Image (cartoon, grey):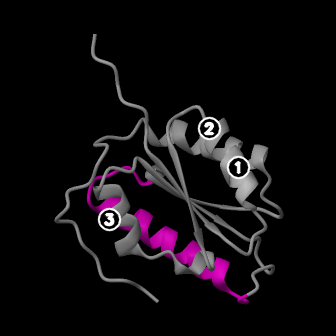
Amino acid sequence: MHETPAPRIVVLYCSRGGMSATEAKSVYEQVSDGPVHLVAMPCSSKVDAPHVLKLLSKGADLVLVLACPEGACQFMVGNVRAEKRIRHIQQLLLSAGIENKRVGLVRGDSFHTQAIVEQVTAHVKAAIESTPRSLPESLSVSPIA
């Protein structure tokens, strides 16, 4: 019997959004769907297409961005930029014949452990149905503003 490996999950989150190192560790321990790699970013707007596509091409099954709610970004429109970039990445994936559910964005008032675990679990369920599980390394794009 061939067992499917656990999905590899990358969660990019705004370091100003309030998730502490203790909460990040708790999320890591509570997500049962597979290993979760939590990456703090100075702002969710720092997410870009080449970076996300590289994560996918190197084996991530899901890249999820946690952003502040609209109007609450300390950098004014960082979360709006992040949302535009995620939509652009999803369009790129679709145009390449790859399910766009493998990349997502979640906005929240306050990201506490249980809410993050629930969001990751919901996105994993959608993402693991998509194939192939990795992107060709030759897929490249130019960043958008």
What x and y, as percent, mark residue 50?
A: 34, 74
Q: Which residue is mark 2?
A: 31
What x and y, as percent, mark residue 95?
A: 30, 62
Q: Which residue is mark 1?
A: 116
Q: Is residue 92 magenta?
A: yes
The amino acid sitting under disc 2 is Val
Q: Quadrant of residue 52?
A: bottom left
Q: Which residue is mark 3?
A: 54
Between discs 1 and 3, the one toward the N terminus: 3
Q: Would you place residue 15 above or below residue 36 in this image? A: below
Whole-angstrom CA distance, mark 3 to mark 2, is 23 Å
Q: Is residue 121 magenta?
A: no
- Residue beneath the point at 64% across and 79% down: 80
Q: Are marks 1 and 3 in contact (CB under 8 Å)?
A: no
Q: Is residue 60 left or right of residue 82?
A: left
- Residue beneath the point at 83% across and 64% down: 109
What x and y, as percent, mark residue 121?
A: 61, 39
- Residue beneath the point at 30% across and 82% down: 142
In the image, 34 versus 53, the foreground residue is 34
Q: Quadrant of residue 33?
A: top right
Q: Would you place residue 59 above or below residue 107 in this image? A: above
Residue range in magenta is 75-100
